[in-house]
Image (cartoon, rainbow, N blue to C red):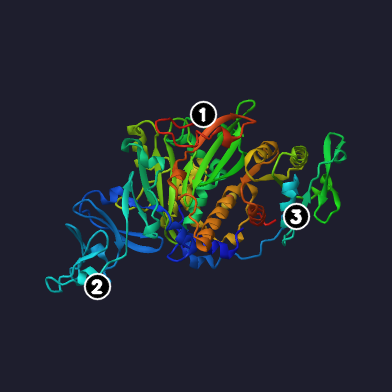
């Protein structure tokens, strides 16, 4: 038997502003745990700024390439990050419970870190995104460095995009 | 997620609103040329950016787009008579030319100058391709006419349709940018639709359902690249351009025509979707043209004599659960265009973006909103001309291409993503 709509809200005509009042309205629960890592100096400056704003579950880090920072632990490279409060943090620990990883780069200095982060996230089924700021050769190199390791890449001329993207993602 | 005040800013396009002012910097489609097919055609009611207007074509073939209502006592000029050099109000016979200038007030004495003091608001209306375009902004800042490739090729190479969508323009536009829905909502179309099927790219599409996304900021808007695995060492890329404020193109498939849309606000709760298909270097075949007229591909079937889709919210878009079960459609709704409109209208007239849960795959949408907002604010606060006004920004193409893994799509496609007259599209 073909059912015919009886009330307005049982058909597509309910897509009105008036009917929108009856949408279930509960606060959006479940914070998303986002990790934001600046892969080079240019990116670090931006991320330190952005970290000052009010965020939900987001945590912010910078990466400073140092010879000792890449320790090969079994097959998986772990790296040391610096939290925006200045403390040191191990990538493997910081990824615990994370939902999304956003890497910020302005050049390809952080290529090694991007690869370590990308692999660690793949292993843990954590979504990866990369935001490349700036134009020209350095940014182009950053794109190539990040492409294999970020499911989503955004190439932008505007630093505000870091905040915009994180806000849109409810970080 | 978008803060409520930003949602307001981006969705409201009436006079005096920041986004309304933004739209008034561009030439925008007002109606199809077929709606005023000949001199002295019946006048057509047109609502654009929340302004009610009337379009007509006088005996000399001049197009006019003027205030819908007579300056005398507010009667709709749709009831007017299209008489020689103007439109005469049916009530007391006041007559207006295509510039809105009143040229006759019959009740006044023979040589009275009174009518010269009466002028209705009017906007230019110009035919470019199959569309009549208007510019509703400051005449002093009127830009060059649009140069989108589908409007520049010979008439036998291009086809445009339009449909009414009962939602705000922005959620419609966002569908054009949102590449990640295609493998779901439109999956069946790749197999069945005469304007899609058979392309090699379709196999890559269906074989890799977890694509990677890349969004690149360019002067006129964005390029959104989606890559999937292809043969060893290669990716299949689908590249969608967006030009501000609301021009998008779908990446092509094989030798099928290229297509895209312009999403134009009627008012804050309705928009026109202008849908085009064209071939850069050859005429459309009779079969292709017929398929478009029958509503295949990205077109749709309208109720005869109207631009309202046959499948609409009054009939639940002719939902067919059996076809869904058989796998002929993913959502149960037939046709790419109405698959989109049914879902976008279901969001409500203006979706509450404060309730969304965007994911990183939505980056194209996130960036497009950011660009629209930045452009509207820069115009409002500093008078800066927005991206997409310059006709050079119109000369873009969508692309589908297989590239070596290490290649950057934007560097590799500089030529392919630009219009080169006489050069075939880059398509797999
Ligand atoms: S899955 Fe995207 S709107 Fe529901
Ligand atoms: Fe769609």
Residue found 40% across the figure and 56% down from its top: B141
Give a yes or no on whether discs 2 and 3 share a subunit. Answer: no
Give a yes or no on whether discs 3 and 1 share a subunit. Answer: no
Q: Which residue is mark 2?
A: B72
Q: Which structural element holds mark 2?
A: loop
Q: Quadrant of the N terminus of chain B?
A: bottom right
Q: Nearer the viewer, mark 3 or mark 1?
A: 3
Query: Are dots 3 and 1 in contact, CB under 8 Å?
Result: no
Left or right of B26 on screen, residue A52: right
Mark nearer the N terminus (1 vs 2): 2
Q: How many marks?
A: 3
- Relative image position of residue B412 (x, y in whole percent): 56, 32
Point out the residue furthest to the top here: B232
Q: Which residue is mark 1?
A: B200
Q: Is residue B327 visible?
A: no
Using the rendered view, name the quadrant where residue B89 is placed.
bottom left
Query: Are dots 2 and 3 in contact, CB under 8 Å?
Result: no
Q: Which structural element holds mark 1?
A: helix
Mark 1 and mark 2: Cα distance apart in space: 62 Å
Residue found 57% across the figure and 40% down from its top: B225
Q: Residues within 10 Å of mark 3 (few under 14, many from 20)?
A: some
Q: Is residue B154 above or below residue B127?
A: above
Residue found 34% across the figure and 52% down from its top: B31
Which disc number belongs to residue A48?
3
Q: Nearer the viewer, mark 1 or mark 2?
A: 2
């Amino acid at each position: 038997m073909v059912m015919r709509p009886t009330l307005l809200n049982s058909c597509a005509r309910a897509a009105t502003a008036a009917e929108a009042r009856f949408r279930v309205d509960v606060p959006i629960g479940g914070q998303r745990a986002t990790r934001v890592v600046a892969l080079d100096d240019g990116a670090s400056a931006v991320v330190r700024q952005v970290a000052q704003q009010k965020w939900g579950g987001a945590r912010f880090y910078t990466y400073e390439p140092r010879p000792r920072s890449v320790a090969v632990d079994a097959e998986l490279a772990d790296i040391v990050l610096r939290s925006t409060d200045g403390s040191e943090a191990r990538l493997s620990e910081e990824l615990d419970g994370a939902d999304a990883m956003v890497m910020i780069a302005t050049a390809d200095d952080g290529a090694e870190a991007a690869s370590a982060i990308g692999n660690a996230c793949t292993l843990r089924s954590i979504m990866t995104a990369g935001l490349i700021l700036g134009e020209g050769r350095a940014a182009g190199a950053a794109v190539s460095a990040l492409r294999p390791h970020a499911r989503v890449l955004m190439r932008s001329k505007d630093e505000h995009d870091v905040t915009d993207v994180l806000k849109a993602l409810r970080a | 997620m978008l803060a409520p005040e930003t949602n307001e800013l981006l969705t409201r396009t009436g006079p005096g609103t920041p986004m309304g002012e933004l739209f008034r910097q561009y030439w925008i489609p007002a109606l199809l040329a077929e709606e005023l097919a000949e001199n002295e055609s019946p006048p057509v009611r047109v609502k654009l950016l929340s302004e009610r207007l009337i379009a007509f074509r006088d005996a000399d073939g001049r197009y006019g787009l003027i205030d819908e209502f007579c300056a005398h006592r507010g009667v709709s000029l749709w009831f007017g008579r299209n008489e020689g050099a103007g439109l005469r109000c049916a009530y007391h016979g006041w007559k207006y030319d295509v510039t809105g200038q009143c040229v006759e007030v019959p009740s006044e004495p023979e040589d009275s100058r009174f009518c010269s003091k009466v002028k209705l608001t009017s906007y230019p209306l110009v035919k470019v391709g199959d569309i009549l375009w208007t510019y509703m902004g400051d005449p002093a800042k009127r830009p060059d006419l649009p140069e989108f490739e589908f409007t520049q090729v010979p008439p036998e190479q291009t086809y445009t349709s339009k449909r009414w969508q009962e939602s705000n323009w922005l959620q419609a536009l966002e569908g054009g940018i949102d590449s990640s829905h295609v493998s779901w909502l439109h999956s069946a179309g790749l197999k069945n639709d005469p304007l899609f099927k058979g392309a090699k790219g379709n196999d890559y599409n269906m074989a890799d359902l977890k694509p990677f996304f890349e969004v690149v900021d360019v002067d006129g808007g964005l390029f959104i690249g989606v890559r999937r695995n292809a043969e060893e060492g290669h990716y299949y890329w689908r590249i969608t351009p967006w030009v501000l404020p609301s021009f998008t193109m779908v990446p092509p498939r094989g030798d099928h025509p290229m297509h895209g849309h312009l999403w134009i606000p009627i008012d804050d709760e309705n928009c026109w979707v202008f849908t085009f298909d064209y071939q850069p270097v050859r005429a459309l075949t009779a079969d292709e043209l017929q398929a478009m007229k029958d509503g295949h591909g990205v077109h749709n079937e309208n109720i005869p004599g109207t631009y309202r889709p046959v499948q609409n919210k009054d009939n639940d878009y002719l939902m067919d659960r059996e076809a869904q079960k058989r796998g002929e459609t993913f959502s149960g709704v037939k046709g790419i265009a109405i698959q989109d409109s049914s879902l976008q209208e279901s969001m409500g007239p203006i979706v509450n973006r404060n309730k969304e849960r965007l994911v990183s795959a939505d980056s194209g949408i996130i960036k497009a909103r950011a660009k629209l907002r930045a452009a509207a604010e820069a115009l409002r606060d500093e008078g800066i001309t927005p991206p997409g006004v310059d006709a050079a920004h119109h000369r873009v193409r969508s692309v589908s291409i297989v590239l070596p893994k290490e290649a950057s799509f934007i560097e590799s496609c500089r030529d392919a993503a630009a219009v080169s007259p006489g050069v075939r599209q880059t398509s797999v």
